[in-house]
Image (cartoon, rainbow, N blue to C red):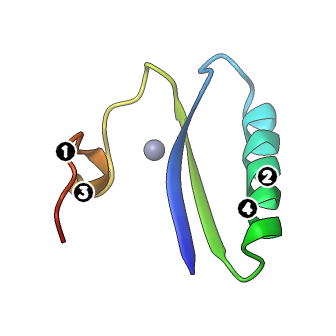
């Protein structure tokens, strides 16, 4: 299983703090999904352009 998402964080916190938040979230997810491959992308809240795959940037839900 692959889990990947963006997380909006306070743009004023340090990289060290952002990293510790991401690691804490990753640990929580691994408790529920021990075999998961997890990629969490930290974004500065309110200061990041939309990016990544169009599917993930869109407000609309695609129907597969
Ligand atoms: Zn991002």
* Horizontal and vertical percent position of residue 25: 75, 50
Q: Quadrant of ligand 1?
A: top left
Count of labels shown? 4
Q: CA distance from mark 4 to mark 1?
A: 26 Å
Q: CA distance from mark 3 to mark 4?
A: 22 Å
* Horizontal and vertical percent position of residue 16: 80, 36
**Quadrant in the picture for the N terminus:** bottom right
Mark 3 crowdedness (10 Å alpha carbons): few <14, some 14-19, many ≥20: few
Residue that numbered label 4 is attached to: 29
Element class at badge 4: helix
Q: Is residue 54 above or below residue 33?
A: above
Element class at badge 2: helix
- Please report contact status of discs 2 and 3: CB closer than 8 Å, yes or no: no
Q: CA distance from mark 2 to mark 4?
A: 10 Å
- Please report contact status of discs 2 and 4: CB closer than 8 Å, yes or no: no
Closer mark to the observer between disc 3 and disc 4: 4
| The one of 59 and 21 positioned closer to us in this rendering | 59
Residue that numbered label 3 is attached to: 55
Q: Is residue 32 left or right of residue 62?
A: right
Residue that numbered label 2 is attached to: 23
Closer mark to the observer between disc 1 and disc 3: 1
**Quadrant in the picture for the C terminus:** bottom left
Closer mark to the observer between disc 2 and disc 4: 4
Residue that numbered label 1 is attached to: 60
């Amino acid at each position: 299983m692959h889990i990947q998402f963006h997380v909006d964080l306070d743009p004023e916190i340090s990289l060290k703090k952002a990293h510790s938040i991401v690691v804490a979230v990753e640990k929580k997810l691994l408790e529920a999904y021990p075999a998961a491959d997890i990629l969490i992308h930290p974004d500065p809240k309110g200061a990041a352009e939309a990016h990544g795959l169009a599917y993930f940037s869109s407000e609309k839900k695609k129907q597969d």
